[in-house]
Image (cartoon, rainbow, N blue to C red):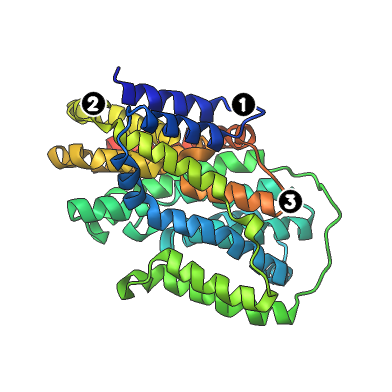
């Protein structure tokens, strides 16, 4: 085992079994700094990680305070007041989160729906954390259907010249399977008993007048912004500026520096150790066994080092084995249902929940994620072997 791979293993252990006294991001950053200082990891690896992660990290840092500002305005509470209850409310919310993830992207789903679902839960007396798990889970389960649904899809599509039609044929059916199985498992975890007295608040017209144009801008920017040179973080920056004018403040304390540092440090160590991971051998395994091993390697790797660095280390080996692209993409996209550091979207969700007053620890996320994600992953693995 090379020293680079050893440093990566140490960092991963600190995220899987974090110390109660030292935050995981501090420990991982310390490992990366020491590895660079003793020249186990070249300084260029930091630059490579920044080049790959600068845009999603910028979005992460801007999106959480944006969600806080929209919540402070009262927008999410007002929208929740407009949504009535019903026998199939939870089912409708599940598929709404799936649709937002597919059509816009997983970050839009987490940023816009997490606070909304928390307020809906409070309004109807449900468990806010249980209901808010919907966008977190579907950010992984439903993010493979289209190139725009996930940054991992865009990276691979650009590298291998894949189009929307390719995703509709090879990834969309698996997305339907994952989302359907995910719902069947999730509804068993949803608490049926009332946890609080339902609220009867009315929508605040001012909050809707201020927030609606901001949300419309976000959805439009996430959908077509790239065509006009507007990255998702730029769209979020404009929206944050607009809400800051309305609230007359920027919630600096809500900026998720810890998750951003964690993702950057893991990305640096993963890219430095890429040559030692022997992914060419994994992709070179023939037949159904090769599909299974590739899928599981991608899923486990995403949870260990975050899915964006993981998909980057797969790019070069995929050039020689393009037939394994769907196993890789489905693996890195679905894997983060199991562990909160698996994707920036789940780190974004965790930070948002903390700012909403409902902190979710990694073990709690894993407890729900394994119950929902593991059966969905198993179903997708079967679909991967059966579907074209």
In this view, the residue in front, 27 or 266, is 27
Query: Is residue 303 among the parts visible in the rendering?
Result: yes
Q: Position of residue 191 (x, y in %)?
A: 73, 42
Q: Are marks 2 and 3 in contact (CB under 8 Å)?
A: no
Residue depth check, mark 1 versus mark 3: number of the one nearer the observer:
1
Q: Which residue is mark 2?
A: 278
Q: Position of residue 36 (x, y in %)?
A: 37, 33
Res 160 label? none
Gap in Å between the C-alphas at discs 2 and 3? 43 Å
Q: Which residue is mark 1?
A: 19
Q: Residue at x 18, y 55 (%)?
A: 161
Gap in Å between the C-alphas at discs 1 and 3? 23 Å
Q: Which residue is mark 3?
A: 357
Relative to 136, 76 lies left or right: right
Displayed quadrant of residue 32: top left
Relative to 275, 116 lies left or right: right
Gap in Å between the C-alphas at discs 1 and 2? 30 Å
Position of residue 235 relative to residue 385, above or below, is below
Position of residue 306 relative to residue 60, above or below, is above
Q: Secondary structure at mark 2?
A: loop
Residue depth check, mark 1 versus mark 2: number of the one nearer the observer:
1
Displayed quadrant of residue 258: top right
Q: Secondary structure at mark 1?
A: loop
Q: Are marks 1 and 3 in contact (CB under 8 Å)?
A: no
């Amino acid at each position: 085992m090379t020293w680079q791979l050893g440093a990566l293993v140490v960092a991963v252990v600190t995220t899987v079994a974090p110390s109660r006294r030292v935050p995981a991001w501090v420990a991982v950053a310390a490992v990366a700094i020491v590895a660079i200082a003793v020249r186990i990891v070249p300084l260029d690896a930091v630059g490579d990680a920044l080049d790959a992660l600068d845009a999603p990290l910028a979005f992460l840092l801007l999106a959480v305070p944006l969600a806080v500002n929209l919540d402070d305005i009262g927008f999410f509470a007002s929208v929740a007041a407009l949504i009535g209850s019903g026998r199939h409310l939870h089912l409708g919310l599940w598929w709404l989160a799936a649709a937002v993830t597919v059509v816009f992207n997983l970050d839009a789903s987490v940023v816009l729906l997490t606070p909304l679902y928390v307020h809906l839960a409070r309004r109807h007396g449900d468990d806010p954390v249980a209901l808010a798990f919907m966008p977190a889970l579907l950010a992984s389960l439903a993010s493979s259907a289209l190139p725009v649904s996930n940054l991992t899809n865009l990276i691979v599509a650009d590298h291998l010249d894949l189009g929307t039609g390719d995703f509709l044929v090879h990834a969309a059916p698996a997305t339907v399977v994952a989302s359907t199985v995910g719902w069947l498992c999730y509804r068993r975890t949803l608490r049926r008993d009332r946890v609080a007295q339902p609220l009867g608040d009315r929508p605040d017209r001012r909050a809707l007048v201020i927030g609606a144009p901001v949300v419309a801008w976000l959805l439009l920017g996430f959908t077509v912004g790239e065509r006009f040179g507007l990255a998702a973080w730029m769209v979020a920056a404009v929206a944050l500026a607009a809400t800051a004018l309305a609230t007359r403040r920027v919630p600096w304390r809500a900026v998720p520096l810890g998750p951003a540092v964690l993702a950057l440090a893991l990305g640096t160590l993963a890219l430095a150790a890429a040559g030692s991971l022997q992914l060419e051998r994994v992709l070179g395994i023939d037949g159904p066994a090769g599909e299974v091993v590739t899928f599981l390697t991608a899923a486990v790797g995403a949870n260990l080092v975050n899915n964006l660095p993981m998909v980057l280390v797969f790019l070069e080996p995929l050039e020689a084995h393009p037939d394994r692209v769907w196993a890789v993409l489905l693996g890195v996209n679905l894997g983060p249902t199991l562990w909160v550091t698996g994707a920036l979207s789940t780190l974004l969700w965790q930070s948002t929940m903390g700012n909403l007053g409902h902190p979710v620890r990694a073990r709690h996320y894993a407890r729900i994620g394994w119950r929902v994600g593991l059966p969905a992953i198993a179903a997708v693995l079967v679909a991967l072997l059966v579907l074209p």
